[in-house]
Image: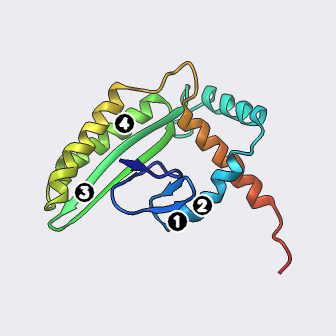
Amino acid sequence: MASCDYCNSTILFGGVRQGDLRFCNQKCFHNGYLLSASRQMPSDLVRQQLEQLHRGTCPKCQGPGPVDVHTSYQVVSLLVLTRWSSMPLVSCRACGVKSQVGNMLLSLVAGWWGFPWGLIFTPVQVTRNIVGLCQAPDPTRPSAQLEKLVRLHLASQIVSQTPAGPR
């Protein structure tokens, strides 16, 4: 299955393409320019910000790090309506585990009630949470996903500070 180059969501059907990049929807497509800008960031700046975030305190609980990206998955259904999502959280391991366990329990309770997608996606999302609980990011070094988020954050800061051209 393909994944969105901006938000890493799984793309089941369709999506939007731009060259070798693939996006899950128009919002991610429009934010795709940040990907290009993020790839232009100076390596030393990215490395400095990445290490500072990774070794810092958890942005969620203010507890000790290491801080990394912990993704939790959920599905909620009601008859013919099913909504599934992936939620990356920049946090310490303990906060990541709380999020994964909470979304796994929510999916177990509220995921099954939709036909047919609830019956299909509930075991998928529960399994993804279990895998996430068992395979935590390496605490000795930042993950590639955390680096991507730092690059995107730096790019968005630079783009927002750039004055608009002539009108």
**Are the residues flagged by discs 3 and 1 in contact, CB closer than 8 Å?**
no
> Which label's residue is closer to the chain start, 4 or 1?
1
Give the CA distance from mark 3 to mark 4: 18 Å
Amino acid found under the numbered disc labelled 2: Asn
Residue to which mark 4 is pinned? 98
- Residue at the disc numbered 2: 31
- Image side of residue 136 versus residue 39, left or right: left
The residue under label 3 is: 76
- List the residue tagged with mark 1: 27
CA gap, disc 3 and disc 1: 22 Å
Which numbered disc flags the more N-terminal residue, 3 or 1? 1
Circle 1: is it few (<14), some (14-19), or many (20+) Cα within 10 Å? few
- Under mark 4, the amino acid is Lys
User: Residue pushed farthest top?
Assistant: 140
Q: How many labels were placed on the picture?
A: 4
Q: Is residue 165 above or below residue 128?
A: below
Q: Are marks 1 and 2 in contact (CB under 8 Å)?
A: yes
The tag on residue 19 is none
Q: Nearer the viewer, mark 2 or mark 4?
A: 2
Q: Residue at x 38, y 63 (%)?
A: 14
Residue 32 place in picture, x, y as percent: 60, 58
* Residue 148 location, quadrant: top right
